[in-house]
Amino acid sequence: MSRSGVITFLGNPLTLAGEALEVGAAAPDFTLHYFADGMKTLTLADLNGRPALISVAPSLDTSVCAIQTKRFNQELGGLGDQIHSLTVTVDLPFAQNRFCGAEDIANMKTASDYQTRSFGKDWGMLIEELQLLARGVFVLDANGKVAYAETVGEVTHEPNYDAALTALRSLL
């Protein structure tokens, strides 16, 4: 897990903008976009009241990001409306919608940071050189405090699913 602001992609070092979020910190606000009968916005306030798992990935059109999203979708299916679950990428909302339809993603909402990359900057997840998001997972409690934070050190590796899911389930 990288916390120093440097990650790698195929072994090549890349720089993360912003500061890494630490467990116990208040999650920074954000405005993300998604498509559902038109363009909509999603903010941190929309996740309040229930624990949330936020899966962050570079692009749903890559194999590891697809695996990550499908795995969390499957694992979280039994939790229903006890939680919020969100995948954040910089893919256009239309592409996210297409991916979710093609892959039967029903338990994860997708939202995009494509307009300002402010989620990536404020959450310490924006890869400066690529303007894509790094891979990681955050678990928030019902009040928006960070209960778990992982930034995957090598972009091509999968996150620690078990640790994230354990953290999420501990909040139920």
Image (cartoon, helix red, strand yellow):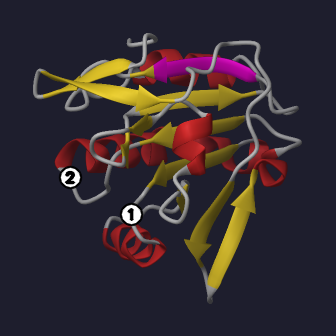
As drawn, 63 above or below 169: below
* Kind of residue sitting beneath label 1: Asp
- What percent of the width, then of the height, locates residue 18? 54, 29
SS state under label 1? loop
Residue 167 badge: none
Image coordinates of residue 144 in percent, x first then y, are: 81, 33
- Residue 91 disc label: 1
Image position, residue 22 (x, y; %): 64, 14
Give the amino acid type for the residue marked by disc 2 in the picture.
Thr
Q: Quadrant location of residue 13?
A: top left
Foreground pick, 162 / 142: 142
Q: Which of the two residues, 128 or 112, is positioned nearer the viewer here?
A: 128
- What kind of secondary structure does the magenta stretch mostly adopt? strand
Q: Residue at x 10, y 28 (%)?
A: 10
Compared across the picture, whether 24 is left or right of 96 comes to right
Q: Compared with residue 117, is residue 168 higher up or lower down, i.e. above or below?
A: above
